Amino acid sequence: MVIVSHPDRAARKDVVEVLACSSQRAGRPASSAEILLDQADGLSWPTLCKCDVIYAAPRAELSNRRGAVTEQRRAHLVRTMIEAHGWAAVL
C-alpha cells in the first residue's frame, strides 16, 4: 500500500488514505490507471500500484514500511490518480 494522505493527517489521524499495490512481481506493463514502483522506491521488485481506487485504512494496521515513492514518481502518481478518477475535467 502507498499512503496518499497529507503527511500531517498520516501522522495524527487514526485512518489514512492509501492506494493498493500488488504483492506479486509485475509481469505486465502498467495500465493507464496504474503506475510501476520498483527498487528506487524501496520495494524488492517492480510492483503495480492501482491509482483508480483510494481506500481508507486504519493507520495502526499499516506496518512493515518498505520505502518511499521517489519525488519524480510522486508527481506521476498524482497525475495518474487525477486521470484515473476523471478529476482533470474540473481543474
Image (cartoon, grey):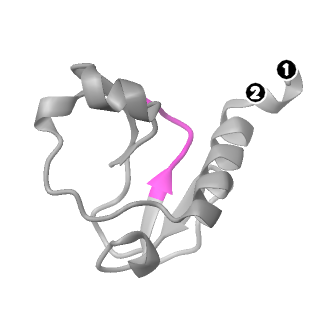
Residue 12 visible? The answer is yes
State if disc 1 and disc 2 touch (CB < 8 Å): yes
Tell me if residue 75 is in the magenta stretch: no
**Which quarter of the picture shows residue 56?**
top left
Q: Position of residue 31 (x, y in %)?
A: 62, 59
In the image, what residue occupies the spot 34% across and 76% down?
25
Highlighted range, magenta: 49-55
**Which quarter of the picture shows residue 82?**
top right
Residue 55 visible? The answer is no
Side of 87 relative to 52 (left or right): right
In the image, what residue occupies the spot 75% across and 27% down?
87
Label 1, residues with CA under 10 Å away: few <14, some 14-19, many ≥20: few
User: 24 above or below 44?
Assistant: above
Tell me if residue 50 is in the magenta stretch: yes
User: 15 above or below 29?
Assistant: above
The secondary structure type at the circle numbered 2 is: helix
Question: What residue is disc 2 on?
Answer: 87
As rendered, which of 87 and 7 lies closer to the eye?
Answer: 7
Side of 87 relative to 51 (left or right): right
As rendered, which of 11 and 1 lies closer to the eye?
Answer: 11
Q: Amino acid at mark 1?
A: Val
Q: Position of residue 33 (x, y in %)?
A: 62, 49
